[in-house]
Amino acid sequence: MSANLQLQELAISINAKDLNPAVVNPDFLKYTGIIPSEWELAKQPVYNNGVLQILFNTGLGIFVHPNGVTMVENLSQKPQEEIQVSNITHKLVEKLSQVEYKQVGINPRGFVLFNSEADAYKYIHSRLLAPGPWQEFGGKRVGASLQLSYPLERGVLNLSINQATVQFPDKVVGAILFSGNFNYPLLGNSPSQKIQDLQQIVANWHDSFNIFEQLLIEKFLNFTDATANVSVFPSALPV
């Protein structure tokens, strides 16, 4: 039996050269049809340390900086056919075809709830790591996270595993957070070929998403000591 994996977020991150954050503003996004006209801002855009943050009430955010742009969508248990981030990314790249794109990342994130914070701690320190005296020093237990890298037929899947907590109205629950990064350098000898490759990867985002889910379920979550049948969307997220 597999633990109850909650898929929380999907981000598509594009590395580009000399992208002007001022160009990608809410008016531009709506005027060009990149986002639907009925979408509303969750709050006013914020420009801080060279990064423009645009958040919509649909759960999608756009973060623009001189070296690229990232689109992030809160999945909230949406079925795959309702996820918008790939469609928004496709339209943005189409409208900004003069930008020099270098690579794209498909970045899913999910978590598993445990019956207690102690059980979540035990998952990393006893199930994934070998016990030993190194796990304690000065009377204190070590805190640990894992960074793993899986070479794929194309690109690399980088996986981070961290202990987290989820805040409910009446309690705090232990969790393990799994963050994936599929890193794809773009192929092609010309800007147009690289854009075509980028759009193909974005269109096939669900392939990366399914690999991420399959890896976690088959290799990391085949156990029964996690909390089962618990849905935490949209009110609680790991911190």
Image (spheres, rainbow, N blue to C red):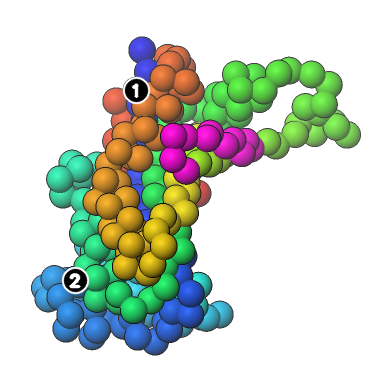
Q: Nearer the viewer, mark 1 or mark 2?
A: 2
Visible residue check, residue 29: yes
Q: Quadrant of residue 189?
A: bottom left
Q: CA separation, marks 1 and 2?
A: 36 Å
Query: Of the residues under marks 1 and 2, which one precedes in the sequence?
Result: 2
Query: Quadrant of residue 139 in the image?
Result: top right
Helix or strand or loop: what does disc 1 sit on? loop
Let me know if residue 153 is in the magenta part.
yes
Label 2: how many Cα within 10 Å (few below 14, some 14–19, many 20+): many
Residue 190: where, in percent of width, then height?
38, 67
Residue at the left extreme? 38
Q: Which residue is mark 1?
A: 228
Query: Residue at 82% across / 26% down in the picture?
Result: 134
Q: Amino acid at mark 1?
A: Ala
Density class for disc 1 (Cα within 10 Å; few <14, some 14-19, many ≥20) is some
Give the residue pinned by disc 2. Answer: 35
Judged left or right of residue 59, residue 218 is right
At x 44%, y 79%, the residue is: 19
Is 19 colored magenta in this rendering?
no
x, y percent for residue 125: 66, 25
Q: Is residue 182 above or below residue 5?
A: below
Three-letter amino acid code at the position of disc 2: Ile
Task: Look at the numbered disc 2 and give the secondary structure of its residue.
Answer: loop
Magenta residues, as a range?
145-155
| Foreground of the two, 197 or 18 | 197
